[in-house]
Amino acid sequence: MTTLALTRLTLSHFRSHKKGAIECDARPVAIFGPNGAGKTNILEAVSLFSPGRGLRRSSAEDMTRRPEALGWKLTGHLSAQSKLHEVEIWSEEGAARQLRLDGKTAPQTSLAQIARVLWLIPAMDRLWIEGAEGRRRFLDRMALSFFPNHAEASLAYEKVMRQRNRLLKDQIRDAAWYDALERQMAEAAEVIHQNRCSTLGHLEAAQAAAETAFPTATLKLTHAEPEFPETVEDMRTALRDSRQKDLVVGRTLVGPHRSDLDAVFAAKGVPAKDCSTGEQKALLISLILANGRALAQLTGAPPILLLDEVAAHLDATRRAALYNEICGLGAQAWMTGTGPELFTDLEDRAQYLEVTEENGISLVESVR
């Protein structure tokens, strides 16, 4: 099995990090330090080595260090598929971030071909009890890890849907304006839906085949429509038939942007939304681990995992079990915690970084 790992990371004027360089190998990375020191900022930087807006979904302007606001830059060595890639990501004066891959300018979606990065952050703890949008994003991140074309299909769908919604808000009724847009939407929607369904199949198979200390979840994709239009032609028909209703509300009411992820605690038969806080967290961890196992089986390499403050929410037994599963998977997991005692069970299976803050500047030091 090959290894996917970020073996060098430099940060320049990124968030609280004025300047920093991290050298590491493929083992898990345990990052500790006081709250507010800049630990999560490192994880956010790593998350940008995959397509999308990163684990905080922040704009490029929000990531720049204040008060200078000069822009920021990340560089990294990404070891993937037995090849070392040089990656540069930057933003100048708040402009959209740019990417250079192996010395050549490239779109963000090109990272999906080489890097698979999954994350679990405290903001996701309420995933099962809040709106469907967060669950769709969670599912789509997992779908992207299996299907690199998922990012392009999602971007294409959202772009064309915005154009259709503009027509609806302007009360444009000429069918000719809608036909071309709805064809493009339907083509992208079919890819999105198929990828999501296949992802759930991969996750369920990975959960069924594993012995784990974390609970398994029964997963189901649900839809606003009684009969979800799965083919291109069915989706085009559904969009056409929905035009009058969509004109009334000024937005598109049919499509994968209205789907939701339903999860049930399998052993108890209890919906995730009705589980305890600890059980909901355990289900999230279980799904991230299942995603990693499935990817390792399918691609020969587990993804990079970003686990922010995850150890603090687990008892000692589950914490040790998590570390054992990560190491058994062979994943480079970047994990944060307030103190080194949270990572004691990892011993020499991990490498350790201490993050401190001095005069508003984050400092990173490798420790043993």
Image (tube, helix red, strand yellow):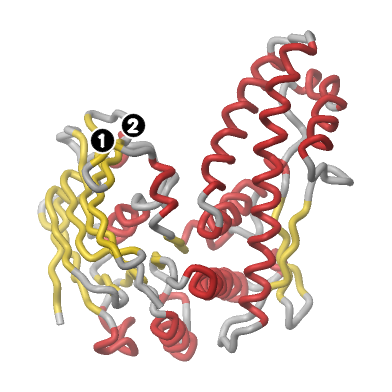
Element at badge 2?
loop
Q: Residues within 10 Å of mark 2 (few under 14, many from 20)?
A: few
Name the residue type under label 2: Ala
Q: Which residue is the extreme one toward the front?
A: 82
Left or right relative to 223: residue 38: left
Say if 213 sits above or below 150 in the image. below
Left or right relative to 157: residue 246: right
Left or right relative to 163: residue 270: right
Say if 318 sits above or below 225 in the image. below
Whether tag 1 and tag 2 are in contact, CB under 8 A, the answer is yes
Which residue is rendered at x = 39% and y = 52% of the image?
50
Residue topped by disc 1: 91
Q: Is residue 368 visible?
A: yes
Of the numbered discs in the image, which one, if any, rests on residue 71? Answer: none
Which residue is rendered at x = 13% and y = 56% of the image?
20
Which residue is rendered at x = 35% and y = 72% of the image?
3
Quarter of the rendering containing residue 76: bottom left
Say if 61 sits above or below 8 in the image. above
| Quadrant location, the N terminus | bottom left
Name the residue type under label 1: Ser
Which residue is rendered at x = 28% and y = 60% of the image?
78
Quarter of the rendering containing residue 217: bottom right
Residue topped by disc 2: 96
- How far across and how far down the image is residue 112, in percent? 44, 51
- How far across and how far down the image is residue 113, in percent? 43, 53
- How far across and how far down the image is residue 162, in percent? 61, 25
Q: Mark 2 or mark 1, which is nearer the start of the sequence?
A: 1
Q: Residues within 10 Å of mark 1 (few under 14, many from 20)?
A: many
